[in-house]
């Protein structure tokens, strides 16, 4: 055999060995490579905690998670909608807006049904959540949105909206700081005390502050009192068009706001107040009451760590029905049904909502955990928000929605009552006229 043949044969064998080794290396990379999970969110206050959890998850699982923040929420919503139209949604994201918006994403096939994962192992994942929180992400058979029944998201925190009161200002008013008003009349009586202390033109303290210029918080409190005065069934019957807003019970709801204004318990100018201003006033010890959600705990802590305050349910008008409050899932994540990483995304979402991670999120951000097991060692103020979760409700779980023009007329009508432009009876008639127009359009 010639030297040339030997050299040629060696080169061929070397080349074959190199190709085989390269192919084996590529095969090994394919079997061992891990996906990158992309998560879009809008929660500025939670961004540092999310990044720390992402690092922890990668260390434990080898799977990299990239949280991408898009704020404010309006900008985030626009980005998600554009991504849905362009088929570029990330592996995990949230849907902001009304329940009908959520349903439209589901019907378009953008969101994975998590029911099989929730119910696996005798409902192990499903059972860790507060039921009222999970309900926000659930659609039942026959729902008015025509969405397929199922669970389409997992809550990462929960919230309730209640009243708060400044204990130091209570003392100045001669009130027991450990005994907030339980009845609506007791609440009005405190308004009279506030008015008395402010006589002479000098404002010593303000009454109730809240973002009623944003209107949805007016809607929230009015619904609380509607449930207390007439019960859930009559409220839902009104939304269905079976009970008019001119009914005496609805007129009574409207009159409550007139009575609050007349008593002096409301901040002067509350109808134009945004919630950030309300939070600043309460945190700085200038307002006796606030109407706000559990997220305020973190806000107040940042503004005034020494603020001495308590949490209370809105004072009852009647004893016949319980005082329901808005609550449920604060923020939730959904999984892209078209994601090539959806199985890994499910695993990450299960990990994120597990006890230890939920406890860390709650401690780091002062939000209520969605996992029941993580709520056992909450600070007192947060625990007061969590303890009434069973009393919570929300329009997103009612299975039916009021027309947007009706809600607008309702909320603006209450604003007009507070500033003395209209009577409760006039507002009731105005709202009913809008309702009848909307029902007439639907019948056509």
Image (tube, helix red, strand yellow):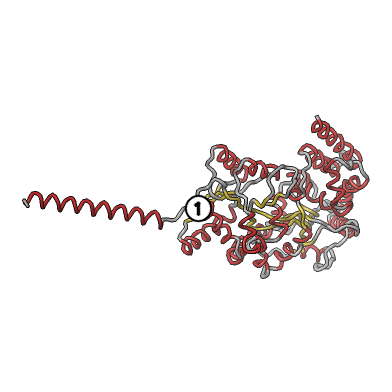
The residue that appears at 62% across and 53% down in the rendered structure is 114
Q: Is residue 154 left or right of residue 426?
A: left
Nearer-the-camera pick, 398 or 327:
398
Q: Position of residue 228 (x, y in %)?
A: 86, 54
**How many C-alpha atoms fall within 10 Å of the one at disc 1: few (<14), some, or many (≥20)?**
many
Residue extending furthest toward the top? 444
Under circle 1, the secondary element is strand
Q: Quadrant of residue 198?
A: bottom right
Q: Quadrant of residue 428?
A: top right
Q: Position of residue 77 (x, y in %)?
A: 61, 43
Q: Is residue 31 above or below residue 419?
A: below
Q: Which residue is mark 1?
A: 37
The residue that appears at 85% across and 48% down in the rendered structure is 235
Q: Is residue 112 left or right of residue 419?
A: left
Q: Is residue 37 left or right of residue 334?
A: left
Residue extending furthest toward the front? 1
Nearer-the-camera pick, 410 or 277:
410
Q: Position of residue 172 (x, y in %)?
A: 81, 64
């Amino acid at each position: 055999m010639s030297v040339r043949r030997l050299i040629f044969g060696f080169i061929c064998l070397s080349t074959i060995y190199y190709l085989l080794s390269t192919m084996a290396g590529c095969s090994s990379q394919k079997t061992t490579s891990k996906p990158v999970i992309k998560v879009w969110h809008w929660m500025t206050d939670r961004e540092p905690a999310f990044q720390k959890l992402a690092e922890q998850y990668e260390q434990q699982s080898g799977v990299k998670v990239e949280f991408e923040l898009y704020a404010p929420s309006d900008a985030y919503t626009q980005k998600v909608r554009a991504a849905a139209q362009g088929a570029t949604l990330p592996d995990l994201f949230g849907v902001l807006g009304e329940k009908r918006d959520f349903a439209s994403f589901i019907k378009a096939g953008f969101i994975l049904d998590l029911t099989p994962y929730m119910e696996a192992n005798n409902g192990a994942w499903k059972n860790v959540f507060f039921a009222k929180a999970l309900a926000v992400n659930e659609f039942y058979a026959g729902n008015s949105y025509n969405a397929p029944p199922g669970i389409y998201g997992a809550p990462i925190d929960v919230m309730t909206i209640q009243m708060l009161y400044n204990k130091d200002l209570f003392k100045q008013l001669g009130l027991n700081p450990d005994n907030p008003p339980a009845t609506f009349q007791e609440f009005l009586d405190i308004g009279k005390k506030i008015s008395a202390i402010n006589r002479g033109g000098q404002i010593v303290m303000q009454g109730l502050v809240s973002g009623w210029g944003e209107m949805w918080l007016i809607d929230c409190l009015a619904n609380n009192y509607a449930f207390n005065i007439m019960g859930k069934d009559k409220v839902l019957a009104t939304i269905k068009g079976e009970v008019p807003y001119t009914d005496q019970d609805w007129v009574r709801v409207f009159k409550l706001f007139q009575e609050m204004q007349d008593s002096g318990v409301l901040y002067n100018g509350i109808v134009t107040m945004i919630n950030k201003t309300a939070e600043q006033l309460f945190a700085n010890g200038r307002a006796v009451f606030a109407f706000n959600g559990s997220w305020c705990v973190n806000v107040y802590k940042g503004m005034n760590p020494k603020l001495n305050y308590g949490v209370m349910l809105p004072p009852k008008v009647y004893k016949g029905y319980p005082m329901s409050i808005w609550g449920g899932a604060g923020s939730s994540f959904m999984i892209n049904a078209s994601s090539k990483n959806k199985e890994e995304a499910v695993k990450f979402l299960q990990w994120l909502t597990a006890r230890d991670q939920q406890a860390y999120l709650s401690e780091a951000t002062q939000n209520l955990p969605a996992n029941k097991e993580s709520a056992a060692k909450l600070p007192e103020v947060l625990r007061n928000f969590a303890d009434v979760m069973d009393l919570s409700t929300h329009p997103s779980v009612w299975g039916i929605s009021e027309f947007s023009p009706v809600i607008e007329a309702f909320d603006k009508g209450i604003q007009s009552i507070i500033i003395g432009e209209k009577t409760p009876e006039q507002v009731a008639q105005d709202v009913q006229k809008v309702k009848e127009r909307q029902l007439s359009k639907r019948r056509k």
